[in-house]
Amino acid sequence: MWLPPYSGVLAKDGKCGGTAPKTFTVPLTSLRRTTTDERRNPMKQLLRKTIPRLWVEKFSDGCVALFPSIRKRYAPPTSSHGAVFPLGIANAGKEALLDRIPSETSRAERRFLYHFFRSVWSGRNDVLEVGPFLGGTTRAIAMGMMDHPQRTQASRLHTYDRFKNYRSDESLLDFMAPLFENGTLIESDRDVIRQTTDFETVFHQVHQAQSYHPLIRCVNGPLPDLPEQEQTVPNLFAVANGVTLDAVFIDGCKSWYGTRYFMAHVLPHAQPGTWFLMQDYGQHTCFWLPVFWEVFTDAFTLGPYVDSTYTFQLTRNISPEEVIERFPAQPDEWTEQRFNEIFASLIQKACDRDDDRARVVYHVQWAAAFAYIGMEDRARIILEDLRRASWADGSEKFIAWAITCLTYRPGPTGSINVRLDS
Ligand SMILES: C[S@@+](CC[C@H](N)C(=O)[O-])C[C@H]1O[C@@H](n2cnc3c(N)ncnc32)[C@H](O)[C@@H]1O
């Protein structure tokens, strides 16, 4: 599947392995784009893409090579908010472990998680993950926690999933094929998976022999995706009394209502300084995540991000009552105007931090929000404008694909795809 380029920087071959640390920069410079100007000026359009531009680039590269000091005249101003994040793993054994579990995250994201929990997480209290699936992210987080030099011995990684109804049995088995090949799973496991489409046992088999395993507290605790599921689903997600969280990794908030429920239950265990890392923040389908974080923009600051994983740090306490009051149970309780305001603000922020990927994805999420609440025509206009925008050049395939799976809504027996092509 094609997606807009990640925001981090990896080696030229696209791999982030190797011994030399690769860096990831968080651009927070206030550079506005002159896109309307570009659109009005076909000559500029032409120069942006064609051979004369390549000549100009080659010439300027040569000048910079001869006189390195001129480079800084053309560099954007340095930003005190910027951060440099390593993505390389010097230890080949650890690097291989990060890639051994089939995962729905990118290689860069798992390396990012490892480094984040090794050096950004405080090491003091506990960490919570929702949506580990087979635990590709669980492993990256737990390995980072293990390597944290000041980790408190008592800190734990609480990981929650419903461990079923995620993929159909054959698709689940296909996805797990590498685990059969490397001997983590044996043939008899196949029948159990076929019968139940449950992967909790597999999760334990994958992690139980690893040195980080004692850190993990695995909980089968589903989030309700609809209000009525609060009465019908057993063992609903709940955080144990006395747990204090200084980092929360979210990869299982797959619905608007589930996000509201999750945040109302997790925030009482967080405090100013707690990090929230969201793998789906930059996935076009999960528009509810950027919307939630924009509603509470007064309570979070943006941290580093790579691919579709974005991080935010809590700056003040938020009560469950405030979550319920400011974030409705369903998106159709809001007006078109409310969504316009939220996405205008998100898109402006993406421009301000020079985050082209987010700029494209926020537009698709904006369209997804409208399609979700039944305003398909509005959604089509947003995507049509996006397709024409010169700054979105290179995103055509992504936009065409997104139309076929713009978002999803929870149904009684799984998610229902919301698409614009039918
Ligand atoms: C995209 S996968 C997670 C990928 C994983 N982090 C990895 O490293 O590959 C999403 C996970 O969220 C879980 N999930 C989806 N809806 C859920 C719900 N309502 N409650 C709990 N878990 C849920 C799924 O079972 C699945 O394991």
Image (cartoon, grey):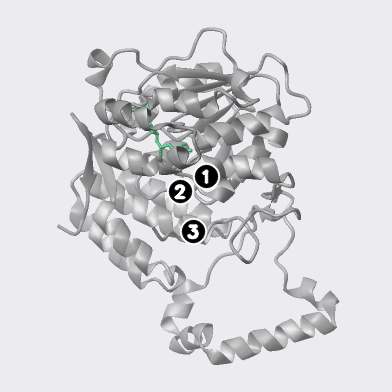
Which residue, given by chain and number where applicable, does mark 1 sit on? Answer: 309
Q: Is residue 300 above or below residue 383?
A: above
Q: Of 158 and 378, which appears nearest the observer?
A: 158
- The residue lying furthest to the top in this view is 241
Tags 2 and 1 touching, CB below 8 Å: yes
The picture quadrant where one finds residue 61 is: bottom right
- The residue lying furthest to the front in this view is 187
- The location of residue 327, given as percent across then percent down, is 36, 30
Q: Of 154 and 139, which appears nearest the observer?
A: 139
The answer to whether residue 168 of the structure is visible from this angle is no
Which residue, given by chain and number where applicable, does mark 2 sit on? Answer: 282
Q: Residue at image x 46%, y 50%?
A: 346
Foreground mark, 3 or 1?
1
- The location of residue 68, given as percent across then percent down, is 83, 77
Which disc number belongs to residue 357?
A: 3
Image quadrant for the N terminus? Answer: bottom left
Image quadrant for the C terminus? Answer: bottom left
Q: Determine whether, in the image, residue 93 is placed left or right of residue 404.
A: right
Q: Quick one: SS at disc 3?
A: helix
Q: Determine whether, in the image, residue 274 is placed left or right of residue 392.
A: right
Q: Residue at image x 58%, y 50%?
A: 108
Q: Amino acid at mark 1?
A: Thr
Mark 3 vs mark 1: which is more N-terminal? 1
User: Which quarter is ligand 1 in?
Assistant: top left
